[in-house]
Image (cartoon, rainbow, N blue to C red):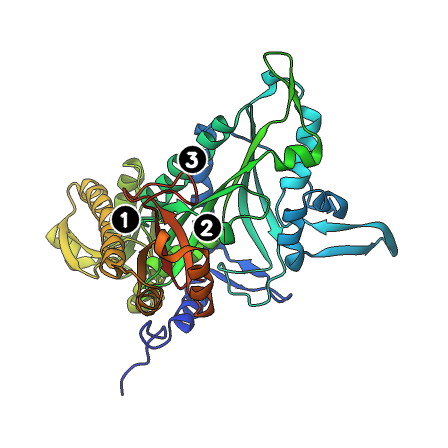
């Protein structure tokens, strides 16, 4: 009798495969309140790796971390009309606390532009106070009607950057720097995810922004996932909150602002971009455990050598762990590590030890081969780099092979059923964008003819990248 697969095959039911994997790889579970989630230790270890890599890049861009309150006066959101209109359907509002009705309702943080601008107005007085570059790691709440763990949850974790600048040019340059040097660099180099970087259309722009730029990735089911956004806010919030500074010429002016964010949605992106029917496939630069060294049998010499290999890997800067749970069947343990996506397994038994070799199993390809115990750390370090590059190349080839150029809206709808499409924005426009939406297809972003980010919505030669999205 054939053994039932551990995970629902992707080709059979991709959403079910996704839910199976999250549960069986012990990444997360649904919380007791609909739309919330419990991130389990292994899932949180992956998020911590994301945080560490992102935080280093954010600080390299000059931003400093701070923390602002979870509760925001409802009145703050009403100060910027477009902002409150955009978030009203998702707001969680507290009207009672301490056994009584509050005089003024408070909103549970959906994003922090308003409360941070309340303090910017206090902290900024002179051009010498600029640029002011703030980042916050926090949780936010947006009431989600159709929750899916990591992708869309009522409460999720993220970072949100908020900055003030002396001029519009400086704000634009900083928002663009975050987009490329922080977000795109992290997604490509760490997550091994090739992203299309572009400009959101007016219909998809962040509420309260004058420009939104985005990183869009393709999943293995060929849908698009927005991985991170960087916004130019103009002076909208400066005006709304009365933030001003004395410029170099003595004139009183209002700063130009940006905001930008990424979230635990990236966890879903890694799962759906790289995972296969056997589980996760974590890029080595992201994996909290890059190598697991497994003892096949309860043998004193084997256990000792496993410890030696582990020490050698740690000394080489490899994030490694040992598995000497010989009371659990080897097959079960191997499947467990496959589910968790650990890039390399080193499997050692008495025969391997006698021959001076260890069996190396690659999670990306599933290949197994014997390697010499002498210098095993150097072999592993080289292979980790190869696996990282290979996962990126595989995802890029998939996206390029399923993206086609089209000239009409019907062609775009047809192409989006089996991948992505590129269509000149001049041929699509806002009217065509609305027609696409009726078929469940969205414009993910606009790119320049040379593949860059357009400077305006109507830049000549701009191309719309369209597809079905999460």
Residue 42 visible in the current orientation = no
- Give the alpha-carbon distance from disc 2 to disc 3, as whole Å: 16 Å
For discs 2 and 1, the disc positioned in front in the rendered view: 2
- Quadrant location of the C terminus in the rendered image: bottom left
Residue 355 visible in the current orientation = yes
Q: Residues within 10 Å of mark 3 (few under 14, many from 20)?
A: some
- Give the alpha-carbon distance from disc 1 to disc 3, as whole Å: 52 Å
Among the 4 quarters of the image, the one containing residue 428: bottom left
Q: Is residue 27 above or below residue 136?
A: below
Among the 4 quarters of the image, the one containing residue 79: top right
Residue 300 locus on image (x, y percent): 27, 54
Mark 2 near mark 3, Cβ–Cβ under 8 Å?
A: no
Q: Is residue 178 left or right of residue 356?
A: right
215 vs 407, nearest the viewer: 407
Q: Is residue 438 left or right of residue 466?
A: right
Per the image, the residue denoted by label 2 is 201
Per the image, the residue denoted by label 3 is 176
Residue 39 locus on image (x, y percent): 52, 57
Q: Residues within 10 Å of mark 1 (few under 14, many from 20)?
A: few
Circle 3 SS class: helix
User: Earlier along the polypeptide chain: callout 2 or callout 1?
Assistant: 2
- At a point 65% along the width and 59% down the height, the residue shown is 89
For discs 2 and 3, the disc positioned in front in the rendered view: 2
Residue 173 locus on image (x, y percent): 44, 30
For discs 1 and 3, the disc positioned in front in the rendered view: 3
- At a point 19% along the width and 58% down the height, the residue shown is 350
Q: Is residue 55 above or below residue 380?
A: above
Circle 2 SS class: loop
Circle 1 SS class: helix
User: Earlier along the polypeptide chain: callout 2 or callout 3?
Assistant: 3
- Give the alpha-carbon distance from disc 2 to disc 1, as whole Å: 60 Å
Q: Which mark is residue 304?
A: 1
């Amino acid at each position: 009798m054939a053994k039932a697969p551990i995970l629902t095959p992707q080709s059979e039911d991709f959403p079910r495969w996704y839910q199976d994997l999250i549960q069986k790889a012990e990444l997360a579970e649904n919380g007791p309140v609909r739309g919330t989630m419990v991130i389990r230790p292994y899932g949180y270890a992956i998020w911590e790796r994301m945080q560490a890599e992102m935080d280093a890049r954010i600080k390299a861009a000059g931003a400093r971390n701070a923390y602002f309150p979870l509760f925001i006066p409802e009145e703050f959101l009403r100060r910027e009309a477009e902002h409150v209109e955009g978030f009203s359907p998702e707001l969680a509002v507290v009207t009672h606390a301490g056994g009584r009705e509050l005089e003024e309702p408070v909103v549970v943080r959906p994003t922090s532009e308003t409360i941070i601008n309340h303090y910017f107005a206090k902290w900024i007085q002179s051009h010498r106070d600029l640029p002011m570059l703030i980042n916050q790691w926090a949780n936010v709440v947006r009431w989600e009607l159709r929750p899916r763990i990591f992708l869309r949850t009522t409460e999720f974790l993220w970072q949100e950057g908020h900055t003030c600048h002396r001029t519009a040019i400086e704000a634009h340059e900083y928002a663009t720097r975050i987009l490329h040097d922080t977000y795109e660099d992290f997604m490509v180099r760490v997550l091994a995810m090739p992203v299309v970087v572009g400009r959101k259309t007016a219909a998809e722009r962040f509420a309260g922004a004058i420009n939104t730029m985005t990183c869009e990735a393709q999943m293995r089911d060929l849908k698009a996932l927005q991985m991170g956004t960087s916004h130019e806010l103009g002076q909208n919030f400066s005006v709304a909150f009365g933030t001003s500074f004395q410029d170099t010429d003595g004139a009183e002016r209002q700063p130009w602002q940006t905001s930008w964010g990424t979230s635990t949605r990236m966890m879903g992106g890694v799962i759906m971009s790289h995972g296969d029917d056997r589980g996760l496939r974590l890029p080595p630069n992201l994996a909290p455990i890059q190598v697991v060294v497994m003892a096949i049998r309860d043998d004193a010499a084997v256990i000792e050598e496993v410890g030696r290999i582990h020490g050698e890997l740690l000394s080489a800067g490899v994030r490694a762990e040992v598995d000497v749970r010989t009371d659990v069947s080897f097959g079960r343990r191997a499947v467990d590590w496959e589910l968790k996506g650990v890039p390399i397994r080193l499997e050692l038994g008495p025969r391997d030890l006698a021959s001076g070799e260890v069996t190396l199993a690659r999670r990306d390809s599933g290949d197994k081969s014997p390697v010499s115990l002498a210098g095993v750390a150097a072999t592993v370090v080289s292979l980790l780099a190869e696996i990282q590059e290979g996962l990126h190349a595989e995802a890029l080839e998939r996206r390029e092979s399923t993206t086609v150029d089209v000239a009409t809206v019907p062609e775009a709808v047809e192409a989006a059923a089996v991948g992505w499409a590129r269509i000149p924005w001049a041929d699509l426009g806002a009217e065509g964008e609305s027609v696409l939406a009726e078929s469940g297809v969205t414009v993910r972003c606009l790119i320049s003819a040379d593949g860059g980010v357009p400077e305006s919505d109507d830049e000549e030669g701009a191309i719309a990248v369209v597809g079905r999205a999460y």
